[in-house]
Each structure stands twice: as structure tokens, then as C-alpha cells.
Image (cartoon, rainbow, N blue to C red):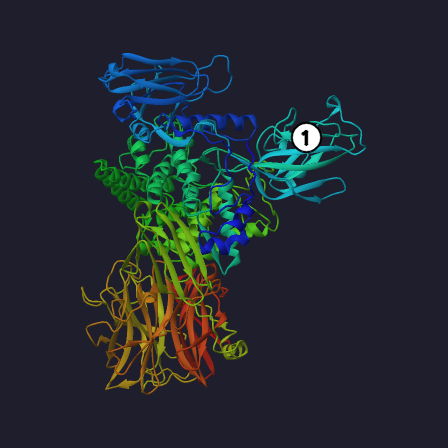
Amino acid sequence: MSSSNARPEDNRRLTKPPSKAHEQSERFVIDPAYSSTDRFPLCKHGASCNGIWVYGDGELESYRLSVLRRRVKEAKLKVWYPGIFLVSRCRGIFRLPISELPLSEAGQRHFKFKSNDRSKVKAYLSEDSKDEKEQLVLYQAAVGDLHTVNIQNDGAHFTFLNVEVDTRNPDDDALPEPPVLFICNDNPSCFNGAVGCEWRCDEIGDERWSKWSKCLVIASSVTQNPPHAAVDPSISMDKPTSLKVSNEAIIHDFSVELYGRVEIKCYSQDGKAMLESEVAPPRLFVGESVEEALDDNIANQEQSTELVLLRGCAKDCQAVDENSSTWVSVHLLAFRFVRIDMPPGTSTAVSVSCEASFRPVQYKGAFASSDEVFNKIWMHSAYTLRMCMHHDFLLDGMKRDRLPWAGDLAISLLSNAYTFADADIVARSLTVLGRAGIAERDINGFLDYSLWWIICNDLYQTYFGDMRFLHREWHRLKLAVENLISRCDHRGLLVVDTEKRRDMVFIDWVDINKFLPLQVLWWWALDSASSIANRVGCCEKATWKSLRDGVRERLVELFWDDSASLWRASSMSEDGFSRHACILSVVSGLVEPNDAGRIAEALLQDGVDDLQGSVNMRPVATPYMKMFECLALSRAGKLHVAVDKMRRYWSAMLDNGASTFYEAFSVEACDSDKTQASFYGRPFGNSLCHAWSSGPCNFISGALFGIQPLSDGWRTWTCNFELPFGFDWASLAIPSPHGLIELEFKVDNSLRISVPSETTLLLDGREFVGPQIVVLPSVRPDRSRVIDDETILEWSQPYRDWHYYPHLVIPAKPTIPGYEGVYMTDVPSVYQIPGKESKWYMTFIGFDGNGYQSFVAESSDLINWTNFRLAFGYGKEGDFDFGGRVLGGYLFESYNVNKPRVLKRLRGKFWCLYGAYSKQGSYEIDPGYEGLCSSEDGITWSRAIESPILSVCDGDAKAWESGSIYQPWLITDGKSFYNFYNAKRMPEWIEQIGVASSNDLIDWQRNAGNPIVKVFPNDYDSQFCSDPKVYSDGNHWVMFYFGLGKEGKASIMVAHSRDLLHWTKDKEPLYPAGGHPQGFDQQHAHKTSLVYNASNKTYYLFYCAVGNKGRGVGLLTSRPLDTG
């Protein structure tokens, strides 16, 4: 281990940060080896001849893993590492085309090289690729010094230079090194020869004996250790904080998780010389938590803390002297806290330091914003990942397992892409995991990890664009896919063979039925394999794509529940639904967007009756699957809910004092178990620094700000141009193979985007070809309040303190002659008809599985509703309202909140704006429209004009309403008509409220200030502000609407305005979901209709209630009713 002299904080002071995001984020840095300008720490080596190291295909990676596994065993880590992993071979032949070797001044080909120290090397010429026989030996020795081979005229007719390397050493217990060549760069053309260099094993009986394959080429320096012997450099950490936690115990806190060797220097307090024979070793205790460091039970230790006394004169070490002794841990340790126990009877003072090991990396990515919690989460996530980047691999955790796993790679690969962009460590991890194939055992011993390995290969190409690696790995990928296909049943689904193959399935640390999540991953792996085959131009693409489509058909046929739009855990209905299958199906793209939205609701709320008791819908158990859940929610249009979940979950670990993020964590358990260190039945088995918990780096940049590659290696990419809600400003830097992508959302409402060369930004239908700087206006939330808080509370008070009616007034399945298929009711609208003031009428929609139709009922007391019949049915096929018509935007005589809601005649008819859908077949199929209808009697309605009055295709439609137009509410001030409506923006699925005006009910102009009621993060309406109902209330206007946000529930909200255009929200709901004691609205309380009954001076608030009685119409009243 070598120690670097330059401190990273010095570099930050002297070097300008590469981006605004780097500059603004520096105060949140926790990494003691942080550097945004260069790879740090640096390895020490002197100047010498440059060149390249050449290894056989996969040999370097196999050797490095073998060494790592031996070190894990020696350090006594309590790790189980199933699967088959090939070891490197010690005999091999390298073959280089003579024609590509450099020419000397005399016109002769020459080759300057060396191999492993103490290896046996023989160089000879051969005629062609079929001739394995040596024909002209040029060099043979058993030393590792540089040697030059000159090919004289008598070798001119030969084709290849062959170099045999044998690293076997029977007198050495160490692992045999892999054969390697160092090719000296006296002439740059030697690199061309290395590109054509091939290798094969030279051991009889090895399956690779007769197979030539391309070599791995690594640029380096001859004086540096060969890559297979490389050691990560270190920095000295010598100033921990000492904390006295009891009368005797002192804890040394290094403030962050570290990985390195602990050094303990003991000083004699009495000044007497310390003879080496009398030096007694101290006892070392380390921990990722204080509790772990305080535990005296050796059996509870997760890693060996054996110490050795330093002797001799190592340059960076203190040898034994007269008054002190220095001890160092034999093994690299993962820890934050250190405790030292001195032997009884000793009188010494102690100082503690650490030589902390770090892989040299550069923080190429960065994030900074007005939200300090997000800034900390990003930086701690990046450091969590950095701590798990060692020994050439992306490891799962440093305290325990300290080895690469394919499932963990699915998260760490993405986080790496947005932070360090270290392609080499991903490539080596993928290589070593897949090199043995899966013919005998799956990767890491788990069937789903074989699938993750295929998926990760696809993701690696998307984010890094490494086609050379893909061509090298293609044959292994192809064999793996073919093996998996052979293990499928007649339906194309994977069979879990627990007997012969001893197949295992992980998915997550939770006891559920894992069969369906496995099949969803199988679909995803086939989709990835098809993409990979397409990249290399192989015919397997069509076959695998067909298999993928067949798997989807079988899954839908066997496990998809149409009525709930969810995946069932098995074909047995009593098994309920599968949360993990739902999550993975959305992230992978298996389900359509409309179904993804319904799935997202279930993930948030467990809103279907039998979800609560379904063991397979239990919450995810790890930050690993929690991140997939957040990604699923964001891709299903619930980005702000996903952001809330991510923020709460990862910030809770920070609140616990974490410097890195944990392998397993529960927010709910924080009060009773702060560190949550126990796992695997061991008191400190939980890894508190785990790569699969680094997901926020990917989520913040990729999901929240939408910065995503659209083609391999970021050749084309996209981003969001709207500042996410809750931020005043934000800066991001994203590394790409072509340069740094930068986004800067400024406080002046502008967005500055840096597009690197050789990339194209696709944004809002436009193309920006790099290199260029793009400056656009950015959209941001308006936090201004035009009405003060005290007034808002005063105006809202009359509409609080509701009383419950004990039954649904319109059940989910009402008896409607001729329409027995209706099983959900929604959107109540109560009104009266002129001349029939003794009755009230209610229109509502009924959903029959295909779409919406509006029905009408009547009542004399606003409680008992009868005479159900059709009011406005489906439109004609091909029309914009074929999928449904939703009445509700009636023209009334008065909009005074205390006046009756009586229909108004205009030009001899009653008028209504209605919501419409063009397609049948499911629930709210986008896009939605608005139409105009009229009625002679106020009971049955017909379309007034043939085209929609509002559409997402209108020329003045903006981005906030690009997904769908929803329910209208019509009012008039006597001069103009106003249409208040909510609309959807995708892909986040954010619904907000806007307004349009008209003089004739036909031609409408949108308000330039739309949306007028916006979602706001961390509130009850962080996802939806929907279904506005506007009334006049004295000197102002009041708007009832519903918000969707906290906990994924819809609640009844209110906002106020003096001018109909500028609205101020009351942050507290008028009525939150789940308030009804009968459980009618435990999921949603929304879509209101307010009526004032002057006879008993009571407000009747009808609303759509979703809960244990399905979806029906509930009733709240401002006074208690006599229901006897």
C-alpha cells in the first residue's frame, strides 16, 4: 500500500472546479480523498518506458478475484459466496501479427517486451494460424527483464510472433500469476500490434486450449506493478475524534466509513525503554457503529482485527524504538469507529491512525441545489459507492462480503455512470462474474443474478457505449441466453430446478412467492438480450424478441388481474398480488403506461381490498429494492411521490448519523433500533456501507431531472427543462464519454445546458447538436401567496368540521336497469331544474370495464336517490368521446356558495361542459378531451358540437397539459364564461389546474398564467391538484379541489382567490382521506359536489369515496343529520 503526499483539499484550493455543480457542492464533500479534477489518490511510480500490458481474455479479472477471495477468507469475513468462478491459468501463448510490429531504422521488425518476474518465456515464429508448431525460436529465458526480439531476414516469410509464458513456481505457496506481456512503446505502431494480439491457454485438458481470443490491453508503465499485482493507493488519516463513552472506554471516530489498515502507536508514559521482547500487543476493536466497536465478544466480530508489530525501516512506518511501539492491523478493515484495549498492567498512551485505501477516481459528476438535504443525500450516496470500489471490482459492501455480486451491480452500475463514470471497473466486474458461464451453476449461485448479468450488460452499453467489450463478451452472453432458454417450460417460463441444479432465487430479503418476479426479470433479460444482439448485428435478435413477446403473453394470461390492473403472485387468487413483480414490471417496461399508473397507486396505498392481507405485497426490505420502487413510481407518473419516498428513506439514515448508506434499513424501526446493525442473525451482520444503497445518485440526476441517454454512450440524450418542485435553483454535471453534460437552473428562471461534442440533446421536439451552450427559459413553482395565512384560515373555517353520513349514497354497483355491468361510480354532480325545486338531481359516471357513461338519479331529501337511468352514453366509434362522457361542468343560475345549484337556460337549452375519452377498454385511457353538450329537460344530454372544445393537440396547449385534459367546471360572471379544468403532464403524471375563457362556450382561450393551482412538494397535493369546483363566497372565490400527495392518498382541499386567476391554497385538507369511521374513503376522498340546503341551513358535500366498499359516492354534511 502506497501513501500519496498531496491532500485532496489542497487540489480543490489550487484547481478550478470543472463545473458550477462541482463548485457549489464542495461544502457537502465528506470523502477525504475527494477530487473533481483528477483521479485521486495517485499511485507512486518513477518515470520510465511507457507501454502496454497484455492479458489473455478474462485472465486478469479471474486472478484478481481469486486473490480477493483468499484475502476475504484470511480476514475471516462471515461471507457465503456461491457460484462457479474460473481461476486464471499459469501457462499461455500470446500471438502477434509480425506485419504490425514496428520497423527499425534498418528495416527489420523488432519487439521489445517483458513478462512476469520469475516466469519462463519463449518467443518463436510461426507461419500461419493453422500452424501451431514452433519454427524459429528467437528467445528463451526464465527472467522477467525487458528483452528485444529482432526478426531477421530469415524470419520474413513467417506470419506470427508467438510468446509462451509459464508462471508456475512449485516452491511458492502464492497463487500462480496470470501470464502477461509488457510491450514497450519504443514506436507507437507497437500498439497496433497489440490490438491484433490474441491469446490461448497452453494447458492440456483446459477447454480454452485450442481457442484463440482477443487480449485485454492496458496502457501503463513498466516500472509500475503489473495490473494483476496493483494495490490501491492510500492516504493517511491520523486525526480521529476521541470520544469517552464510559469510565474506561474511549472511541476514536474517523467521522466517515474507511477501508484500510489501522495503526496504533503506543508510548511509554514512565519514560522507560520498551524492550521488544516485553512489548505486549493491544487489543483492537473496530465497528461501523459505536455499539460494534464497544462489543467485547470476539464471536460477534465481523472481521479479523489481528495486529502485527512493525519492524525494520519501512519508509512510511514507525519501527520499534526505545519509548514506543507501532502495531498495524494485518488485514484491511472496514470501519468508522476504533477502540483500543491495552494489556493489564501496562502504562502507555495511544495514538490511532489509518492508512485508508482508495481506488483512484475522479468525481466527474456533481449535484448542488437549494435543497441541502438532497445535496447531502447525493454526496453520501457517491461516497457509499466509492467505498465499494476496490480491487478492480464494484463490490457489494466492505465489511461483509467484499466481493462482486451481479444483482448489486444493477444499482451500482447506474450510480457509477452519474458520478465517476468508471467504465473499467464495470467491465471487469461483468467479465469476472460471467466468465465461467452458467452451464453448471448460475452467476453468484442465483438464477435471478444470471438474469441481472444480462440486463447489466445492456445497461453498460447504454451508459458507456463500449462496443469493444461487447464483441469480446458476445459469445458468453449468447451461451448464457441459450442456456436459460433451455431451462424453460413449454410456456417459455423459467423453471427453478432446486434439485439437480440447486437453483436459488433472491429478488429481495423478504419472504414472498418469488416465481413471478423472476419471470418478470426473465422478460427483462430477453428484452436486453435482443438489444445486445441488435448491437452486434446477429440473427438471434429476432428469435429472442419473439420469445420475449411470448413470455409477456403468458404472464398476462396467467398472472395479470384486469379488474385490479395488478400482477397476482400466483395463479391462486388467495395468494394476492406481488409487489416485487409490480415494481420490476414498471421499471423494465413490461407494462403499458396506463397499467403502470394503477400499479403505482397500489404500491403507494395498498388500495385494493385484498392487498392489505397479501403477504406478497409486504414492503420491500432493502434500499436496493426501495430504489427500484422509487424508479417504478417515477416512471409510472408519480415522480413527486417517489421523490418524497426517496428523501424520507435516505435522509432517515443521515439523521441516524450515517456517513454511508446501509444494506438493510427500516424507517419505522429507527425509534427502537437506531443503528439497525443486526442482520443474518448476527448482532452486527448488517453492512452499513453497501453499494446497492447508492441509488440516489442515479435517481436525482436520471429520474428527478430526467437526464438520460437515448442511445449508447450518450450520443443522443435528453433532460427535463422544468425545475422540479421544491427547488429554487439547481446545478448538475453528468459525465459522458464525450465530455461533461451540464445543467444549470438559475434563479432568474433560465436554464443553461452544456451539450458536449459528438452528442445531440433532444428536448421538447428540438435537436441541439454539440458542442454548444443552450439557454432556455425554465419553469419553476410559484411560491407566492397573494392572500395572507390568517385570511386563508378565516375563509376556510366554514368548510371544516364535517359530519359523516353512515352509508354510500350511490354504491359502487348501483342497480341501473340495462347497465348491470357497472362496478364503480364516480364524479357526482348535484343540481336542480327550474320549476322542479322540490327535487334534486345527481349525475354520476358508471365504469363498466370499457369506459365511462353518465347516469342520473333523483332525490327529495339529498340522501335517498332513486330512478337511476342513462343521461349521456358513449359517443360513436371514432369520435373523441367514444370512450366515455363525464357530465359535470353545468351552467348554473348562481354560483354563490349559499344559493341553490339550479341549471340555467341559455338560448332555450341547458348547457354543460363534459370530460371525454376517445378509447374504450380501460380506466382513463389518454388523451382526455372536453366537449360541449346541451339538454332540453336537464335529464338527458346530447353533444352540441362535433369537435372537442379543449384538446392536448390545440395550438395553445402547453407542456403542463400535454398528457391529458380532464374534468371541466363552468362558471360565468355575466360577461364571459370560465372553464376551470385539470390536466396531466407526463412522464411524471403531475396534474394541475388551469382556466380558459370564452364568449360563446365554443371557442376557448387558455389563460397565459396556467397552471393557476400547482402541485407543491411534500404537501397533500404534491402529485395532483385536480377537479376544481369554484363558487363565489362574499368578496372572494372559493375552490374545492382534491390533492394527491402524502401517503399516496387523495384528500379534499381548498384554495381562495379574489380575481379567479390568482389562487392561494390552504395547506391543510378540508377533509383528509381515511376520515370516515366506516372505512369508505380510506384510500381516496375526492371529486366533490357542494350543495347548500336552505331548509336546514346545511352544506351537503358529495364526494367520490374509495375504500373498503369500492368506489362510490359518499356524503359529508356541515351539520349532523337525523338519519333515524
Q: Quadrant of the N terminus?
A: top right
- Above/below status of 935 relative to 85: below
The residue closer to the viewer here, 361 or 290, is 361
Where residue 197 appears, x then y in whole percent? 31, 26
Residue at the spot 68% in from the left edge and 41% down from the top edge: 251
SS class, disc 1: strand
- Above/below status of 441 relative to 336: above
Describe residue 84's horizontal placement relative to residue 907 as left or right: right
Residue 1111 in view of the camera:
yes
Res 812 → quadrant: bottom left
Residue 84 in view of the camera:
no
The residue closer to the viewer here, 431 or 1001, is 431
Label 1: how many Cα within 10 Å (few below 14, some 14–19, many 20+): many
Quickly name the residue at label 1.
326
Where residue 123 appears, x then y in whole percent? 34, 16
Res 527 → quadrant: top left
